[in-house]
Amino acid sequence: MDRFTLDLPDEAATAALAARLAPRLRPGDIVLLSGDLGAGKSFFARALIRAATGEPELEVPSPTFTLVQSYDLPAGELWHFDLYRLGAPDEVLELGWDEARQGICVVEWPDRLGGLIPPDRLKIELAHAATPGREDGRTAAVIGLGGRGAALARALRAAP
């Protein structure tokens, strides 16, 4: 396991973290985004997808109601899951979870996966860190588990 915490003083810093991660992703990678409502999970996912596609103005709707959106990337297909409304972990299988695992998966509300959470993953725990004058401040705990997850975390830690 590789773990570190970053201070993200504003949305630009959050987007920069996502942009550092995007070119490192490859099929089979799982990125889990956790945090309270409004902690920045969807913002991070949008920034990641825009950076990965190379389209900074790409419309990236939240899959809150559709539960999943997919995007074609040069590195392979990326699946963006928002599991907030999921009732049980087995419901994710109906969304194409097994197929999605062949590509890159970005999952908001990963606790809804239950026992389907893969052992090899990168988890980013976002939390509010607002202070006067920094209302959009956050912290990100970056946790790499398994060989690939830990490698992604180390690469993010070393990236400028």
Image (spheres, rainbow, N blue to C red):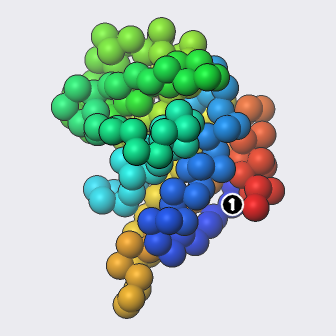
The image shows residue 109, relative to residue 14, as above or below, that is above
Quadrant for residue 8, please give it. Answer: bottom right
Quadrant for residue 66, please give it. Answer: top left
Q: Residue furthest bottom?
A: 132
The image shows residue 88, relative to residue 84, as above or below, that is above
Residue 96: x and y in percent read 38, 11
Residue at 41% over, 30% down: 80
Residue at 36% over, 47% down: 42
Residue at 47% over, 58% down: 126
In this picture, residue 13 sits left or right of residue 5: left
Q: Nearer the viewer, residue 86 or 14?
A: 14
The residue indicated by pointer 1 is: 4
Residue at 74% over, 32% down: 148
The image shows residue 16, relative to residue 87, as above or below, that is below
Tell me the quadrant of the picture where the C terminus can be found: bottom right
Query: In the structure shown, which secondary structural element does the residue marked by tag 1 occupy?
Result: strand
Residue 97: x and y in percent read 43, 15
Residue 60: x and y in percent read 34, 38
Residue 138: x and y in percent read 46, 69
Disc 1 residue type? Phe
